[in-house]
Amino acid sequence: MVLWFSQIRMRDTARVGGKNASLGEMYSSLTHDGVRVPNGFATTTRAYWHFLKTAGIDREIAGLAAAIGKDKSRIPANAARIRKIITNARMPAELEASIVSAYSKLCREYGHNTDVAVRSSATAEDMPTASFAGQQETYLNVRGEKALLRAVKKCMASLFTNRAISYRMDQNIESKRVALSVGVQKMVRSDLASSGVMFTVDTETGFRDVVFINAAYGLGEFVVQGVVNPDEYYVFKPTLKGHSPIIKRNLGEKRNKLVYGTPGSAKPTAKMPVPEKDRKRYVLNDKEILELARYAVEIEKHYSRQAGEWRPMDIEWAKDGKTGRLFIVQARPETVQSRKKKNMLELYTLKTKGRVLLKGDSVGGKIGAGTARIIMDPKRTTGFRDGDVIVTDMTDPDWEPLMKRAAAIVTERGGRTCHSAIVSRELGLPCVIGTNNATRVLKSGRPVTVDCSQGEEGYVYDGILNYDVRHVDVKGIPKTSTKIMMNVGMPESALEQASIPNSGVGLARQEFIITSSIRIHPLALINYGRIRDKKTKQTIDSMTYGYADKKQFFVDRLAEGLATIAAAFYPNDVIMRFSDFKSNEYAGLVGGHLYEPAESNPMLGWRGASRYYSDKFRQAFALECSAVKKVRNVMGLKNLKVMVPFCRTVEEGRKVLAEMKKNGLARGRDGLEVYVMCEIPSNVILADQFARIFDGFSIGSNDLTQLTLGLDRDSELVAPIYDERNEAIKRLISQVIRTAKKHKRKIGICGQAPSDFPDFARFLVREGIDSISLSPDTVISTTLKIAQEERRLKKR
């Protein structure tokens, strides 16, 4: 009637339920690989049926369960009666003796009156298609024979909780076919330390190459139940062996924790507040994060081998506060992402037409609907709710946190390369820009539909309209000779965007990481000790809590953002552009006003390469280099390459390369490739000389158009003239492609033009460009057009 974990395997699900079968499997098969699992035992399902029959309650329970039928309104009353019948029934003497004997043996292993967790394990739970997680009860810090026997009966009764019966009805599983085993496992003293849950897949996107770890203080029930907001850590699996690839971490609030109750108290556990200093620091250190990730990988490998296919896992862990050791206390198949259809993309179509309120340039190919909110300042957002539509004049980096919560964006000003357009593409939001009068035509509180699915022109319709989302199987997307890469800036979008067919990232923008994750001017962090402005210093203190070395805050945050992008597209190349803020944009960062000049035309001023070797900025550039080194050397993501923007002269290029080498990033060492942006006419004219010192070019058509036609791309007054398809621009692009080919250098384009204009993409293919880097939302449609053009050229 009782089996020890060492006697149980996954094949014993019918005997001990899914949870206990999994515990036995791990204890028996993985402890020799270093995965720590606390010992324990389980009552069998035969013991459950024997209990009901011997106590003479089996028929009464079956009748009450059958009487529920398909009417969920009957569940509460009947379920309560069943639970009371079970808890009041007398347990068979032989079952009681078996449980007491096993507990005594466990006490001999761990100590007198040892504390145990008593968990329910049903025969229908922890399946790949239905987890049943949390449907039955768990009892923690159970001590002594009497308390254990009471907990075992309460677990058996919990097979008939309201939620468990309802869940079985939804899964079309009859209660009479389900039995319950009770697992008794030595407690891990995580009440004195921490615990949590981890998955061997990203739970939001289904990206399979990460271990996603949640962590909070105290016993794990608060994390499992969602009572606390835990820390989050992402570890990249492919480079875990030999490296420390913690690619991302988010600090949780962790306001409360669950601990052992006071000895002698009626309640075995109690809720306690977490001190503020502990809430502001991460629960786990790097060594512990990596150890848990390795456990997770071993568990996933083992269960996948058994299943004969990839089997992502949902795992509970706990840290013992007395010994400092980490343990696995449960594992089950992940049942959400593993069941989703892979390789499917979304295409949006408006089903009903409405009255057009506004027109402008469309960004992205999606449709969004919600309540319009006129907002002129991102710090004043009265009335704004998640899913509303932001309507404003134009945006800048301060708007990004708000934009992430919106259903769509509508602006009065801006072109296709403005902030609103770029960020909306990264976030996958529909955005209509350049409407001229959005804040006057629309009123806060008005329901609207924002449609960017109809090509270059976007529409704002009156009311909430119906639209269709079609899913496309990307397996049918043709392969092209021209490499199709992506422009990516938002790390949080990278794991999802990587599912789109691609050959890597042609442009990874640092600026988005700095404005969203760092928000402090690097020189303010470097010179922190000399800052006299109290308000600025207090702000930095608050934002960098826990960092004695403020510079390391910049390095860590930037490295994690870059690593997330590099991991998402691994092993394909990810070409990261060094910072290309203009002075007015740098001044907008915390402390930036202390270090930035006031320039009359920042677009043509102190930006890009000219900063990196300057005495006024070279220390800040060193931090960027340190972040790149951390990603490549510490995390093992060698697919990260670098690119120098706005390099006006060949001599500037040499100075930047020398500065990089001084900071440990020597071109050619350990496979490091260094590209240069081709966005200034001088880059084209002297392409043969630039080719001698760089590994390749990436055409920035936005700035190349601006500087060739002599106009300000942000000025609506000359916006009609701004066109990347101008013959002068095309001739320059043709010239630099020929020069790059002659010198055997790679050449691609990361500017906006091929994303917006299919004819421009076809022109690039005809010219023989190596790669085209596109906005994620245009990859599929543009790939199809490129494939068509390549087929046409082959027939000639």
Image (cartoon, rainbow, N blue to C red):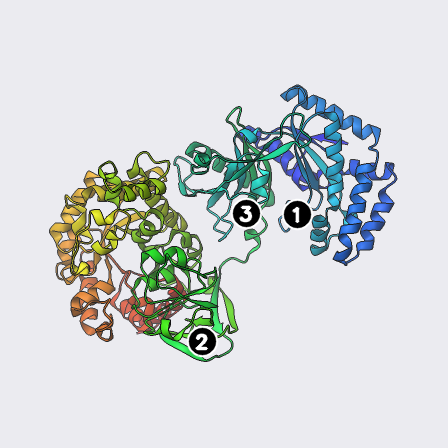
Q: What is the C-alpha distance between the residues marked 1 and 2?
A: 43 Å
**Percent of width and height locating residue 783:** 38, 66
Give amino acid for label 3: Trp
Tell me what residue is drawn at x 48 percent, y 62 percent: 387
Total numbered badges shown on the rendered structure: 3
Q: Name the residue nearer the viewer: 627 or 475.
A: 627
Mark 3 / mark 1, whichever is N-terminal: 1
Marks 3 and 1: which is nearer the front? 1
- Mark 3 and mark 1 in contact? Answer it, CB < 8 Å: no
10 Å neighbourhood of mark 1: few (<14), some, or many (≥20)?
Answer: many
**Percent of width and height locating residue 391:** 39, 67
Q: Which mark is residue 445?
A: none
10 Å neighbourhood of mark 2: few (<14), some, or many (≥20)?
Answer: many
Left or right, 624 with respect to 98, comes to left
Mark 1 / mark 2, whichever is N-terminal: 1
**Percent of width and height locating residue 262:** 62, 27
Left or right, 272 with respect to 6, comes to left
Q: Quadrant of residue 115?
A: top right
Marks 1 and 2: which is nearer the front? 2
- Locate the C terminus by quadrant: bottom left
Tell me what residue is drawn at x 48 percent, y 73 percent: 349
- Locate the N terminus by quadrant: top right
- Mark 2 and mark 3 in contact? Answer it, CB < 8 Å: no
Q: Which mark is residue 310?
A: 3
Q: Is residue 493 visible?
A: yes
Q: Which mark is residue 132?
A: 1
Mark 2 / mark 3, whichever is N-terminal: 3
Query: Dot 2: what SS?
Result: strand
Residue labelled with disc 2:
461
